[in-house]
Image (spheres, rainbow, N blue to C red):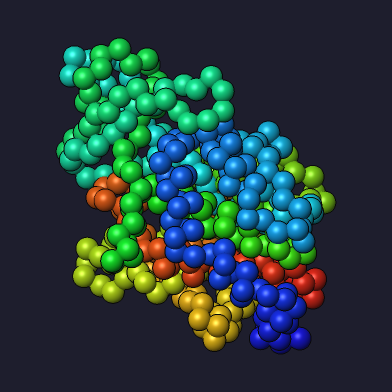
Amino acid sequence: MSTIGYIDQAIAQYDNLFEVMDRIITPQAYFDLFKQLSDNYSPSLTVSAVQGPLVEAVMSSGVGTASPVKVERSLRRSGTIGVTVGSEPAPVWLSAHGDICGYLTGPYNGKGYPLTPFCMTRSRPGRRAAMALGINEGPGPLPRLGEGVMVTEADGSVWFETTRTDLPLWTQVVHHMDAAWDQSTDEFCGFLDNEAGSAVVLLVAKVLSHFPVNVLILMNDEEEGPVDKGNSMFSRANMRLFHRTPTELLPELVISVDGHQQEQALEAGRATNFKQGALFSGMTSMARGAVTPPRLIGFQRALSAKLAEHGISLVENKEGISRSDDVSSMFYTQNIVHVGYPAAYSHFDRKPFGYVSDMVHLARTLVIYALIAQNPGWRSTYL
């Protein structure tokens, strides 16, 4: 069968596909879900406990009956939240991460708390709103111990300025921003990295539950980390999950969902990918991360053209993108694709922002991609 034939067959095979997508994947539904995740601060090592109950609540309504949905707060004790639609083995895994950048306090030094980044800080010198987070004794949101300012100095050092002088050692400090959406411009802000992608894959799970499929949706922890130290220093929960997954349950395809940075284009005055829809790329971090096999790149170009006939935009991104959980997935399958969304300043160098319309295109793209991947003939041809 031709590439277009596989795509046409998948679209025709699932009755009411576009009707279900139109009902579930709306701009308002997307932003409402994103805001719930973004405002529920979950720095690394907290995703399962903090976001797990929220994901369970989200997936308890609006799902279909064609495929069962199971939420596991820590799939195979990895720290990753797993949402199984159908059953395992699932030929395709959709992978996003739910942890946000966090910083660890040192001892109070008279003016504030020196911070150790538990992520890759990308902030220029300046002052940014921040929040110290406490420890929850059970599942649910982390207590907020106190607001303050995260100060980045010219030498790159970071410290937390606050009125509190009694914060425990190793307190997690995060940037502080309520998610917001300006519907007049479609711009939204918050913890885009990567609650924006997590909200997308959860909406996709709801849609897919209305059809007979086997798909595993991941909301990983510990994607953030000191990236400059090498691939093994981040994407730890995803690595843990793959390592603990029996061979017969490993995926044939992983779709890595994360932001595609637009800062360089913005600051150079070049055209960006904003408001163009979903994006796909052939590699991350100059091939330090996963490189997509040529056959899948060719398929995605054909998919892009076919989706456009249905009003769904998937655009090839010609700019470089950063590594994500692909760095651990690539040791278990070579079939990794990078399908994400345009975003800027996701590590809070300036106000992080994106556009809700791009997220809607992304969700619709991923639904159809996951349905195509159900076809054994397609998998034997492209994977």
Query: In the picture provided, is 374 more to the left or to the right than 337?
Result: right
Tell me the quadrant of the picture where the N terminus can be found. bottom right
Residue 321 showing in the rendered view: no
> In the image, residue 158 lies at what x, y percent?
26, 32
Task: Count all numbered tags in the image, as a single digit.
Answer: 0
Tell me the quadrant of the picture where the C terminus can be found. bottom right
Q: Tell me if residue 294 comes above or below residue 331 in the rendering.
A: below
Q: Quadrant of residue 89?
A: bottom right
Name the residue located 48 percent from the left edge and 31 percent from the top edge: 141
Name the residue located 39 percent from the left edge and 22 percent from the top edge: 171
> In the image, residue 107 lies at what x, y percent?
30, 15
> In the image, residue 350 lies at what x, y percent?
24, 50
Name the residue located 56 percent from the left edge and 28 percent from the top edge: 139
Name the residue located 55 percent from the left edge and 83 percent from the top edge: 310
Q: Quadrant of residue 379?
A: bottom right
Query: In the picture provided, is 363 more to the left or to the right than 143?
Result: right
